[in-house]
Amino acid sequence: MEIIIVDDGSTDKSLVIAQELARQHPNVTVISWEINQGKGAALRAGYLAAAGDFVAVQDADLEYDPGDLRKLLDPLMAGNADVVLGSRFTSVGAHRVLYFWHYLGNRLLTFISNMFTDLNLTDMETCYKVFTREVIKNIKIEENRFGFEPEIVAKIAHQRLRIYEMGISYSGRTYEEGKKIGFKDGLRFILYSPVQCA
């Protein structure tokens, strides 16, 4: 297993901690830049550096439980899927209860994405999107910010890949705890989806 840490211009001690981990563990690689470039840019860099058979993303804030990644790998390792998405809305696992409007916004964005992609996903915005390396290496990621989510879903839908969805647990953050995505990101998504699906 390899771990690729992308430090996207953090201003705390994240980079120092990541570099120390890389010194201690040969399977850890650190990619960093001084100026924040956005989630999409960070993922693009990580995907390009990946060498394993399967590729998954773990946000550093641990809203998602890394233990769930094991079950998301099952359809890929069995050869039944090319992509597996973790859904926060179909799980029987623990979920932190937070914002109604975020929940409603997420469902709306997923609905709009499904209209353009002809998929029946329940959680398009999920962080947990696990791919075979061959699939993700062949997708050109252009979006630098949170618009990565609709972009990647549109592109895997366009390729007619075998897509699975599985329930995952979720422990979301409040804005006081560092949540960053907001209304502007939702608007960007709504404008971006038709372009990607055209």
Image (tube, helix red, strand yellow):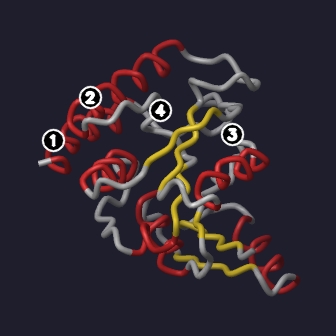
Distance between mark 1 and mark 4 Cα atoms: 18 Å
Please tell me whether mark 2 sits on a helix, a strand or a loop: helix
Q: Position of residue 131 (x, y in %)?
A: 51, 61
Residue 123's tag is 4
Residue 92: quadrant of the picture: top right
Q: Residue at x 58, y 66 (%)?
A: 55
Callouts 1 and 2 close, C-beta under 8 Å: no
Label whose residue precedes the other's in the sequence (2 or 3): 3
Q: Closest to the observer: 79 or 148? A: 79
Mark 1 Cα-neighbour bin, 10 Å: few <14, some 14–19, many ≥20? some
Residue under pointer 2: 112
Residue under pointer 1: 194
Label whose residue precedes the other's in the sequence (2 or 4): 2
Q: Residue at x 56, y 61 (%)?
A: 79
Label whose residue precedes the other's in the sequence (1 or 2): 2
Q: Closest to the observer: 176 or 133? A: 133
Q: Residue at x 70, y 61 (%)?
A: 12
Callouts 1 and 4 close, C-beta under 8 Å: no
Label whose residue precedes the other's in the sequence (1 or 4): 4
Q: Is residue 66 above or below residue 79?
A: above
Q: Hey, what amino acid is under mark 3?
A: Glu
- Residue at the limit of the structure toward the top, as seen here: 100
Q: Position of residue 189 (x, y in %)?
A: 28, 39
Q: Position of residue 122 (x, y in %)?
A: 46, 28
Number of numbered labels in the structure image: 4
Distance between mark 1 and mark 2 Cα atoms: 9 Å
Residue under pointer 3: 63
Q: Is residue 21 above or below residue 176?
A: below
Distance between mark 2 and mark 3 Cα atoms: 24 Å
